[in-house]
């Protein structure tokens, strides 16, 4: 059970690191310095999926997360276990990224809806003020507010 938890935990770290480096403003100077998506290395740090492979290649041996063991022994077996375990972590991280996207996108929709409502209210206030200023005021008579829609 602990191995399964570690597998999913390390995959979450792979997803988080690759997403942060590839998409967040904090690492924009690094991406620009490497040439953005126009150069090989720039593309590697601008694509969360591509970057997650390299993150997994590094984190698998650092964390000892080897969920896949091959029957071949020796150096070849070790390299294959490392490679296949890294690919598995990358695939799990890709699923996490999809889930993260849906959560992030739904939060973005809520924020956009709130912003749209606030803009609509502000526009109505401006229109009311403009109408109130444009109506000629008779002495002692206040201008009537616009009718509700």
Image (spheres, rainbow, N blue to C red):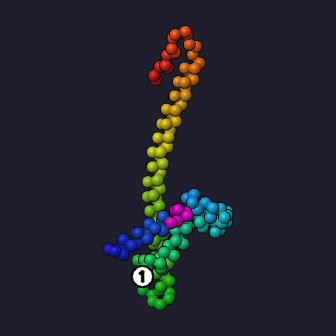
Screen quadrant of the N terminus? bottom left
Residue 26 appears in which quarter of the rendering?
A: bottom right
Residue 129 appears in which quarter of the rendering?
A: top right
Horizontal arrangement in the rendering, residue 92 relative to residue 27 (left or right): left
State the residue in front, 81 or 55. 55
User: Residue 34: x percent and y percent?
Assistant: 66, 66
State the residue in front, 43 or 124. 124
Placement of 70 over or under 99, stated as above or below: below
- Which region shows up in magenta? 17-22
Image point 49% across, 36% down: which residue?
Answer: 118
User: Residue 101: x percent and y percent?
Assistant: 47, 56
Image point 51% across, 14% down: which residue?
Answer: 142
For label 1, the residue is 69
Image point 45% across, 49% down: which residue?
Answer: 107
State the residue in front, 10 or 87. 10
Predominant SS along the magenta part: helix
20 magenta-colored: yes
Placement of 136 over or under 112, stated as above or below: above
Image point 50% across, 66% down: which residue?
Answer: 17
Placement of 94 over or under 128, stated as above or below: below
Residue lying at the far bottom in this picture: please name it: 74
């Amino acid at each position: 059970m602990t191995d399964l938890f570690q597998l999913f935990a390390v995959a979450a770290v792979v997803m988080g690191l690759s997403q942060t480096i590839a998409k967040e403003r904090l690492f924009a100077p690094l991406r620009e310095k490497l040439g953005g998506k126009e150069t090989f290395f720039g593309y590697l740090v601008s694509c969360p999926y591509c970057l997650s492979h390299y993150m997994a290649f590094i984190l698998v041996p650092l964390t000892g997360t080897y969920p896949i063991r091959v029957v071949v022994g020796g150096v070849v077996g070790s390299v294959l276990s490392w490679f296949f375990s890294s690919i598995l972590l990358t695939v799990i991280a890709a699923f996490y990224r999809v889930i993260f996207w849906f959560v992030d996108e739904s939060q973005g929709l809520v924020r956009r809806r709130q912003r749209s409502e606030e803009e609509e209210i502000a526009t109505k206030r401006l229109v009311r003020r403009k109408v109130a200023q444009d109506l000629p005021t008779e002495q002692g008579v206040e201008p009537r507010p616009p009718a509700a829609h």
